[in-house]
Image (spheres, rainbow, N blue to C red):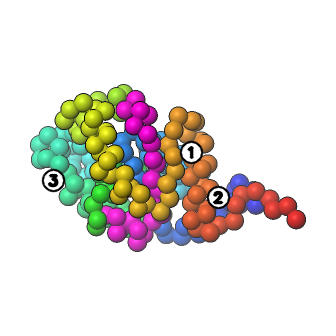
Amino acid sequence: MGEAQSLNAIKSALGDRSIVMVGLMGCGKSAVGRRLAAKLGLAFVDADEEIEKAAGKSIEDIFADHGEAYFRDGERKVLARLLRSGPQVLATGGGAFMNADTRAAIAGSSISVWLKAELPLLVRRVAKRPNRPLLKAGDPEEVMRNLMEARYPVYALADITVESRDVPHEVIVGETLERVAQALDVAPSHEDSQ
C-alpha cells in the first residue's frame, strides 16, 4: 500500500473520530498536529485558540482576571463542543486531559496521542514563549518538573504515546501516523513481500 492509500485507509478507519494531541506545553502538539491534519486532509483545531475566541480574551487574561478554575471550566465546555464536530486533529492545552470528564469525552470520540518530551527539551521550547500563565509561578524548570510529575501518569492513559524530541516535525508526524494506523488496525504503508 502506497502512502496515499495508507493515509486514505487511516482516514477511513477514523470515521467520525478525531485525533486529539495531549501533552505538556512545548511538546509540539500544535506543530505536529497541524502537519498531521494536512497529511490526512482533516481540519486542524487548536483548543486554546477556540477558548480565546469563546471568551473574547487571551488565556493569559482569563487566568489573570478569573483564575485557573474558571479557565478549566471554560476549557472543558469548549472541548466538549469541539469533540462533537470531528473528524479533525485537535491540539489540547496541557491541563485539558487532566479533567476526568474531558478524558472520557476524548476516549468516546477520538484517538488520543500523547507527545511525551523530556524536561530539557520542554524548558528550552517554553523559554521562547512568554505567554505561559503557569510558568509565571516560579522557576520555569521547577514548574515544568512539577507539572511532569503530576501529569505524566495521567497522560500515560492516552491511546498512543509518541516521543517528542529534537528531530524535524515530519519525523514525529510519520511516527504518529504509524502508531495511529496500528491503533486502528490499518495495514502498514509498505508493500508486503511475498
The answer to whether residue 41 is above or below residue 32 is below
The answer to whether residue 186 is above or below residue 30 is below
Crowd class of label 1 (few under 14; some 14 to 19; many from 20; radius 10 Å): many
Disc 1 secondary structure class: helix
The amino acid pointed to by label 1 is Ile
Is the C-beta separation of discs 2 and 1 under 8 Å? no
The residue that appears at 36% across and 27% down in the rendered structure is 128
Q: What stretch is highlighted in magenta?
A: 102-124
41 to the left or right of 93? right
Disc 2 secondary structure class: helix
The amino acid pointed to by label 2 is Leu
User: Where's the N terminus, which quadrant?
Assistant: bottom right
Comparing labels 3 and 1, the label whose residue is closer to the camera: 1
Crowd class of label 2 (few under 14; some 14 to 19; many from 20; radius 10 Å): many
Chain-order first, disc 2 or disc 3: 2
In this rendered view, identify the residue nearer to me: 114 or 177.
Answer: 114
Which circle marks residue 70 in the picture?
Answer: 3
Taking the magenta stretch, the answer to whether it contains residue 118 is: yes
Q: Where is residue 12 in the image (x, y as percent from the top left)?
A: 60, 68
The answer to whether residue 163 is above or below residue 79 is above
Q: Where is residue 26 in the image (x, y as percent from the top left)?
A: 39, 39
Which circle marks residue 172 in the picture?
Answer: 1
Asked whether the viewer can see residue 132, the reply is: no
Q: Mark 2 points at which residue?
A: 7
